[in-house]
Image (spheres, grey):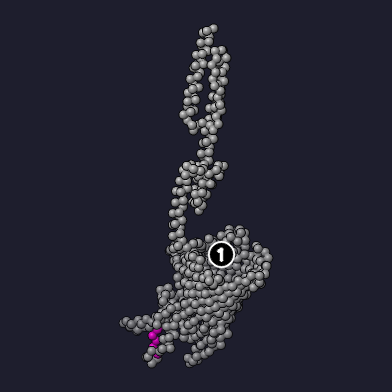
């Protein structure tokens, strides 16, 4: 019996050693100590056989305590990971502009379901937001420096790829079948063309805006930004299409001044002015809006646009002395001045826009068309071939074509070119002056958002038409009455204008259809500046069909057909076209893919 008791005591002593080691390890590692550890009953010494049961109970209790410690450590690891995620989220918030340390700290702890730490722990956690705030401050400083130099900026532009075909072309030469009449049919023509425009506009402060735009196109062709895909894959020219600034004073709301090279500032159609022209000079406008009235607004706009600056001229008269009058005309600059009044009257679904403009072209009656209009200027050249042996001397007269962009200054009397379609006198100068009174009325019916309806009528009259001077018998001047001073534009459209409305208002599948009738008499408008796609600028009658479909809010397919006729024959209103001469309808078809951004 005594041996059995001694063995039990030895077993109890051996069991006590691991228990004491576990308690010592728990006391040495406070990080693993649970917040409220379970109380362990003190070991009781017993000399009975039931001491083994007591040892097993204590071991079981210690095992439960260890499991609780493991659970506590696992929970603390989860909280640390959660806090790390919240701090990273707070950094992203601060990078987006919310760089207040309190906001960062509260964002980090609120997601974890904890209160923001206080005391020493708060000071430790505050170090990271302070570093983040410094980085954000540096970025904001850089952005402020750029903003002070350039202001806010927006990029914009478009690309257009075009297939174009011509049918019914003819020349003005004597017929190959009957030399007594004029006109020979020409072969059809097909070409591919590209237009690319890219710009940036911005604001400096609250009163100044600016813009720059680059565009493709021939430098000497002011009414088109197209470039033809030809010339054995040569690189295509890109030029400065716009460069301007705008001043909008806060003290006078609705008023603005614009200067540089910019979009045409007045309301117009291509009867008088091509859409691709970027004018040069200055314009001023004022618009007043009205609330709670059928009259929605009223506006005035004026412009001063120099077209051609020339050097001082020195012209000798027939007596060999300086002709001051002729010198003044030869050295006169050309400019376009004008003004327009416009207003809008609108109800819930109907809007009526009215405008009246006066465009005065100063100095054009003193120049030959070649000085202003010709892409290629024709120089008359006389060559004398001296006698040789039995061959007598000969004189040959011809013309040399020089690209106009090589003579940008436009100085000097460069001779006659028939590049324009306006009437000219026998001396090669324009017969008429040009002061255009342009009246436009446009009605928009928007009962259907997908299929709005637009009606537009444009009437223009030239108040400075003059009789045409031609050569009569024995070289005498003959005056032909000029009644060719009016033009008309009538347009109907159903559907959204996919090329002008903002992209965010276009949906895939939107479409439009447009029909326009155009008639311009010989001197109704100054021919180099109106629509370049009409086939003829003046002395023409055109039927235009225009349709479009949106493949995407930014991608539009369009088809345009121009059917142009000459109402007065090949030689125009003041020419003697022989009876029986050819006068075909010119058909011009365009298929476009347009990307806007």
Point out the stretch of residues depicted in magenta. 313-317
Label 1 neighbourhood size at 10 Å, few (<14), some (14-19), many (20+)?
A: some
Instruction: State the image coordinates of residue 426 (x, y, percent, origin top left).
Output: 48, 86
Which is the main secondary structure of the residues drawn in magenta? loop
In this orientation, which residue lies closer to the viewer: 518 or 574?
A: 518
Picture layout, residue 464 above or below residue 98: below
Instruction: State the image coordinates of residue 121 (x, y, percent, origin top left).
Output: 48, 42
In this orientation, which residue lies closer to the viewer: 431 or 543?
A: 431
Residue projecting furthest to the left: 389
Instruction: State the image coordinates of residue 283 (x, y, percent, origin top left).
Output: 51, 74
| Residue at image point 48% right, 28% down | 27
Label 1 sits on residue: 591
Q: Is residue 493 visible from the viewing direction of this image?
A: yes
Look at the image and say whether residue 402 sits in the magenta stretch. Answer: no
Instruction: State the image coordinates of residue 180 (x, y, percent, origin top left).
Output: 53, 82
Picture layout, residue 91 above or below residue 395: above
Q: Is residue 220 left or right of residue 589?
A: left
Dividing the picture into quarters, in which one does residue 295 lie? Answer: bottom right
| Residue at image point 53% right, 31% down | 34
Secondary-structure class at tag 1: strand
In this orientation, which residue lies closer to the viewer: 337 or 235?
A: 337
Number of callouts: 1
| Residue at image point 53% right, 30% down | 69
Q: Is residue 396 visible from the viewing direction of this image?
A: no
Residue projecting furthest to the top: 1
Q: Quadrant of the N terminus?
A: top right
In this orientation, which residue lies closer to the viewer: 456 or 42?
A: 42
| Residue at image point 35% right, 84% down | 393
């Amino acid at each position: 019996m005594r041996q059995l008791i001694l063995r039990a005591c030895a077993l109890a002593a051996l069991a006590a050693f691991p228990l004491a080691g576990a308690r010592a390890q728990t006391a040495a590692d406070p990080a693993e100590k649970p917040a409220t550890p379970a109380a362990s009953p003190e070991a009781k010494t017993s000399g009975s056989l039931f001491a083994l049961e007591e040892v097993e109970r204590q071991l079981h209790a210690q095992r439960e305590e260890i499991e609780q410690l493991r659970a506590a450590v696992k929970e603390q690891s989860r909280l640390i990971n959660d806090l790390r995620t919240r701090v990273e989220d707070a950094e992203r918030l601060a990078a987006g502009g919310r760089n207040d340390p309190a906001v960062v700290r509260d964002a980090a702890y609120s997601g974890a379901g904890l209160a923001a730490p206080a005391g020493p722990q708060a000071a430790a956690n505050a170090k990271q937001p302070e570093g983040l705030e410094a980085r954000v401050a540096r970025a904001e400083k850089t952005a402020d420096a750029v903003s002070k130099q350039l202001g806010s900026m927006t990029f914009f532009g478009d690309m257009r790829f075009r297939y174009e075909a011509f049918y019914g072309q003819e020349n003005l030469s004597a017929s190959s079948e009957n030399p007594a009449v004029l006109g020979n049919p020409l072969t059809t023509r097909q070409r591919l063309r590209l237009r690319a425009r890219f710009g940036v506009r911005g604001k400096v402060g609250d009163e100044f805006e600016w813009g720059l735009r680059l565009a493709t196109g021939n430098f000497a062709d002011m009414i088109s930004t197209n470039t033809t895909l030809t010339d054995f894959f040569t690189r295509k020219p890109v030029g400065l299409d716009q460069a301007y600034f705008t001043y909008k004073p806060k003290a006078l709301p609705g008023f603005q001044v614009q200067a540089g090279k910019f979009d045409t500032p007045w309301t117009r159609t291509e009867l008088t002015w091509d859409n691709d022209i970027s004018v040069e000079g200055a314009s001023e406008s004022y618009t007043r809006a009205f609330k709670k009235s059928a009259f929605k607004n009223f506006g005035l706009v004026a412009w001063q646009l120099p077209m051609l600056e020339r050097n001082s001229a020195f012209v000798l008269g027939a007596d060999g002395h300086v002709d001051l009058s002729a010198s003044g005309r030869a050295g006169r600059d050309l400019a376009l001045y004008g003004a327009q009044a416009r207003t809008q009257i609108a109800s819930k679904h109907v809007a009526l826009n009215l405008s009246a403009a006066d465009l005065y072209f100063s100095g054009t009656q003193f120049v030959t068309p070649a000085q202003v209009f010709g892409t290629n200027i024709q120089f008359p050249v006389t060559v004398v071939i001296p006698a040789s042996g039995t061959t007598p001397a000969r004189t040959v007269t011809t013309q040399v074509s020089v690209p106009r962009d090589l003579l940008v200054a436009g100085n000097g009397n460069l001779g006659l070119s028939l590049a324009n379609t306006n009437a000219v006198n026998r001396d090669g100068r324009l017969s008429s002056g040009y002061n255009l009174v342009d009246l436009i009325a446009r009605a928009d019916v928007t009962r259907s958002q997908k299929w709005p309806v637009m009606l537009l009528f444009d009437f223009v009259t030239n108040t400075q038409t003059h009789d045409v001077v031609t050569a009569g018998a024995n070289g005498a001047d003959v005056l032909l009455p000029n009644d060719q001073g009016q033009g008309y534009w009538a347009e109907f459209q159903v559907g959204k204008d996919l090329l002008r409305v903002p992209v965010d208002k276009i949906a895939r599948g939107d479409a439009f259809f447009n029909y326009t009738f155009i008639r311009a008499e010989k001197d109704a408008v100054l021919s180099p500046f109106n629509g370049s796609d009409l086939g003829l600028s003046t002395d023409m009658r055109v039927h235009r069909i225009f349709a479009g479909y949106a493949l995407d809010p930014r991608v539009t397919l369009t088809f345009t057909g121009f059917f142009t006729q000459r109402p007065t024959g090949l030689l125009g209103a003041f020419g003697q076209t022989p009876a029986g001469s050819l006068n075909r309808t010119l058909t011009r078809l365009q298929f476009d893919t347009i990307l806007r951004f």
